[in-house]
Image (cartoon, rainbow, N blue to C red):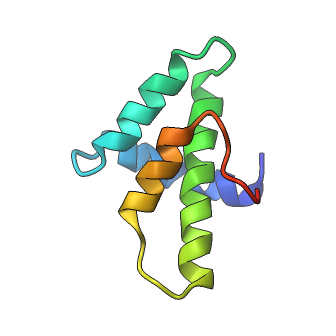
Amino acid sequence: MDEAIEKLLPAIEDQLKSPQTPYVQEAYQRLLTEPDIDEEEAKAMLAFCLADEVEAMMSQERPFHHERYQTLLSLLPAMPEGR
């Protein structure tokens, strides 16, 4: 697993428990219905989307876009382009 993704797993765990980010829990539960995706892989996929948004935020010098993050999560299990 990519080191950046691994470092974001605690944030994903927090988001899965937070009432402020129900869309993360929804994406997680949806991924778990896929036959070849286990809990660890599902969390890594969520972290991958978070990493993509954080990278975009830093490179574009802008605030975190929750809408973009939600869109990335909604596209899973397909992974964001450029990764």
Q: Could you tell me residue 47's position as x and y percent?
A: 58, 49
Residue in the foreground of this view, choosing between 1 and 46: 46
Looking at the image, the residue that sits furthest to the bottom is: 61
Percent x, y of residue 7: 62, 58
Where residue 8 appears, x then y in whole percent?
57, 56
Residue at 46% x, 84% y is 62
Residue occupying image coordinates x 46% and y 31%: 28
Quadrant for the C terminus in the image: bottom right
Left or right: 7 as drawn, with respect to 71: right
Query: In this picture, is 52 found above or below 74?
Result: below
Closer to us: 13 or 57: 57
Residue at point 55% right, 40% down?
A: 75
Q: Residue at left 55%, top 44%?
A: 46
Q: How many marks?
A: 0
Residue 22 versus residue 2 in the image, above or below: above
In the image, taking residue 19 as reference, residue 73 lies left or right, namely: right
Q: Quadrant of the N terminus?
A: top right
Quadrant of the rendered structure where residue 60 is?
Answer: bottom right
* Rendered view: 60 above or below 27: below
State whether residue 46 is above or below residue 41.
Answer: below
